[in-house]
Amino acid sequence: MKATPHNKFEQRLLQEGVALLRDSIHTLQINTGLLCDLKCRHCHLAAGPGRKEVMSLQTMDQVIAYAERNRFATIDITGGAPELIPHIEHLIASLAPLTPRLMLRTNLTALSQPGKDHLLDLFRKHKVALIASFPSTNEGQMSAQRGAGVLDPSLKMLKKFNEAGYGIEGSGLELDLVANPSGAFMPTEQEAAERKFKNDLARKWDLYFNNLFIFANMPLGRFADWLESSGNRDAYTERLRAGFNPGTLDGLMCRTLVSVAWDGSLYDCDFNQAANIPLGGKTTHISDLDGFPERGTAIAVGEHCFACTAGSGFT
């Protein structure tokens, strides 16, 4: 007898006659902690200035040791704001020789904090690909999502990146932007949005970047709280469910990813960390994992997974 699905996403997979199974792992994602200088409305982890959950040096070394034993094509450093985490320099310098592609997700403003100027030189030295959160070229939409006064320091940091070569053709220094809708609706078409962002940034501020990635907001953390308080939860949930696209399943990032939380616990993705759903549904620590999670094993899912499979998906 088949087990009864625990949530509507599992039910939908069953209806479609498909399963979400792990493929060959090639990406290690590291969430360094929930400390951040901003309290963005769309943050699925509810990161912010008051959060104390940060990765210790001991856990960093356990992550580095795991990356030495199991080489990854991509290592993705995220947060919170990774730039604010103690010993982040050690983590970057240790991981850079272990992978052909080291990424760091920045909110731009954290690098404006005192004592962080040296990090840009570190990024350049190790050719770290920077993935910057930049929700909108419209100041009102930016402020509504990330807080008042955020646009100006974000633009100044993008200018510094460009001056250092990031986002400039032929430099070999990658600068990508990530945008999310400012409300309870689906994102615009990515190709058109990228053209608009590139045109707006170049025309208004003489700024440049390589690629734009635009994703649906995840109904978790602070965004889930906003959906509830604004009366948008049910409508947004139905919108995500209605947008389910089975064609996105093969390309979902969770199929090729190991995600490590700030305390060393493992997840199928960063969103499952926010939902407190451990790797494959079983609590595991980075120090207890020798190799890669086995190919063909089931990925733990929740109703938030509809956000990754709506429209063009979250790859």
Image: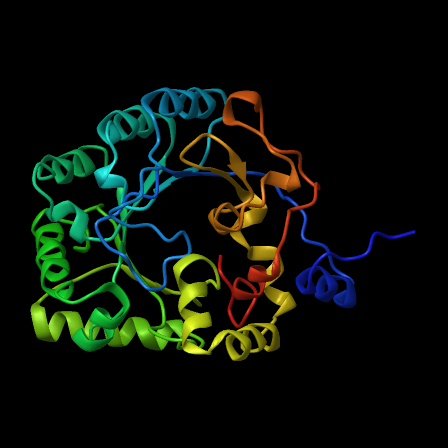
Which x, y percent locates residue 158? Answer: 14, 56
Which x, y percent locates residue 258? Answer: 52, 38
- Image-quadrant location for residue 191: bottom left
| Residue occupying the far right of the picture | 1
Given residues 96 and 147, the one toward you in this image is: 147
Which x, y percent locates residue 236? Answer: 51, 76
- Left or right position of 178 against 248: left
Residue drawn at x 17%, y 74% is: 139
Q: Give above or below for 296 relative to 43.
A: above
Q: Give above or below for 169 relative to 191.
A: above
The number of discs equals 0
- Left or right position of 258 against 34: right
The colour scheme of the drawn protein is rainbow
- Image-quadrant location for residue 77: top left
Which x, y percent locates residue 225? Answer: 43, 64
Residue drawn at x 50%, y 74% is: 233
Q: Is residue 201 visible?
A: yes
- Left or right position of 166 against 273: left
